[in-house]
Amino acid sequence: MNLAQLLLRAARTHPGAPAIFAGERLVSDYGRFADRAARLAAAFAREGLRAGDRVALVMANCPEYLEVMYGAWMAGLAAVPVNAKLHPREIEYILQDSGASLTFVTEGLAAPGANRMHVAGSAVYEKLFEGAPVAVVHREPDDLAWLFYTSGTTGRPKGVMLTHRNLLAMTMCYFTDVDTVKREDSAVYAAPMSHGAGLYNIAHVLAGARHVVPDSGGFDPAELVSLATRHRNVSMFAAPTMVKRLVDHVERTSADCSGFKTIVYGGGPMYVADIERALSVMGNRFVQIYGQGESPMTITALAREHLADRSHPRRAQRIASVGVAHSMVEVRVATEEGRELPPGEAGEVLVRGDTVMRGYWNNPEATAQAIRGGWLYTGDVGSLDEDGFLTLRDRSKDVIISGGSNIYPREVEEVLLRHPAVAEASVVGRPHPEWGEEVVAFVVARADAVSPTELDALCLENIARFKRPKEYRFVESLPKNNYGKVLKTELRAQLGRESPP
């Protein structure tokens, strides 16, 4: 089983079907897409890479992303997607920990610590396609396909090992629980292709549909409306903050949104008022998913028919939920010991099925902690109702989700504690009307004074810009329990009692 076979299937069946667009410009049909991926696989072999090796993608959204991804799979390699917004030190750690043999970057991005590097779209990159194409390398279902690094509570990211089986199961869940895909449909990549938005390409490759990378490389509401008008039948993944900005634009400009087919949202909390407004402004085009890197995009889904059903007596509760279990997984709510809880009781969300990761890269201890008895312990707290709808209550790992990106407090705290004048630090999230949440740091300073400017500079030297605190609060002490653990619930409650900034 090799996911690259899906591309070959589409290319054999419909070689002339349009495949990849840069904005409105056609870059490749399926015949050319498959041929370039096969030639790239040959180049990997010439450079000495063998099945099981890793290729890192430190790339902004671009048409070459898909070529590199499928070229790697055709060669039997594993792709290592890296968030292009990460700090160079974070990128260096991922490249070294993954043991990536080769790294691809886009113009202007650095990859410190890379063994070898190619700039996508450059003249040197184009020379990689001069050799003859090769046949796809066979892989077993449980061979590594996608090594995704997700931030961990230890302050170091963990490599989530996703296999060909995992990603194929995820794709089948898309068809059964999220949306159908036809050849005339278009997937637009406005969210980072290094994350779940990029993985949704597989369903569209299988269907022989179109792949559209905006000229901006990211999210711009006016550009997306224009692309939807041009390409029609557009589907996309968006964080709730992106949905809100798109709805704002459509409402403010009275833009024609008929070109949008499906907007899948997830990656953070969607407030009921916001999704109700989105439905009112743009119509029944929305589907919610809940997943993690460890079970990508596939724990639960809230279907468009559930969002559209205004007659259901528990509509308010349903649209505040994250839906029901995907068709290829089991979901339960349980105690820390794994005892299943009855409907209505809150506990940890567990998931089991073919979408669940093989484990963490070179980290058996973390794997054993996360997967117990065949179940993935998500660290999220929620409750199921009698109809199987899951409502998330809290995030036990204290993750902050800002603009759809995960920020783990301990990672930020460890950086702050490097300053000699910082005695203690605790980081929590505060609700933000546009980004979902923003980072606030509570800091206990030593006798020496320390300024927010100094702490900001320290963060910018060590972590990505989007992870740094938006406010530093200097306090005499942090609230703690009898065991000395900081009570972040009290810090969040303190912020909640105040007026929005």
Image (tube, rainbow, N blue to C red):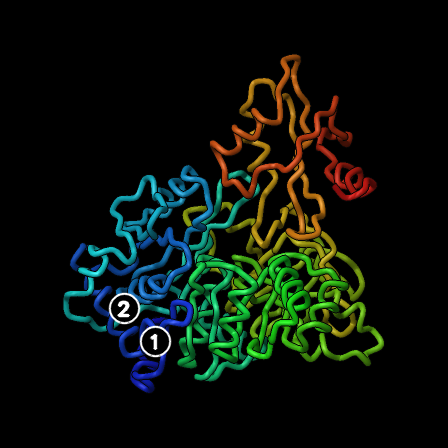
Instruction: Kindly indicate the quadrant of the structure image that contains residue 487.
Output: top right
Q: Amino acid at mark 2?
A: Ala
Question: Could you give the CA–CA distance between mark 2 and mark 1, rounded to whole angstroms?
Answer: 9 Å
Label 2 sits on a secondary structure element that is: helix
Find the residue positioned furthest to the top.
447
Question: What's the mark number on residue 7?
Answer: 1
Determine the secondary structure under disc 1: helix
Residue at x 81%, y 79% (from the top left corner)? 312
Q: Which residue matches tag 2?
A: 37
In the image: residue 306, left or right of residue 49: right
Q: Position of residue 334 (x, y in %)?
A: 70, 58
The answer to whether the residues at label 2 and label 1 have Cβ atoms under 8 Å apart is yes
- Looking at marks 2 and 1 on the same chain, the residue that comes earlier in the sequence is marked by 1
Q: Amino acid at mark 1?
A: Leu
Residue 144 picture location, percent across and down: 38, 60
For mark 2, does the 10 Å Cα neighbourhood hold few (<14), some (14 to 19), or many (20 or more) residues?
many
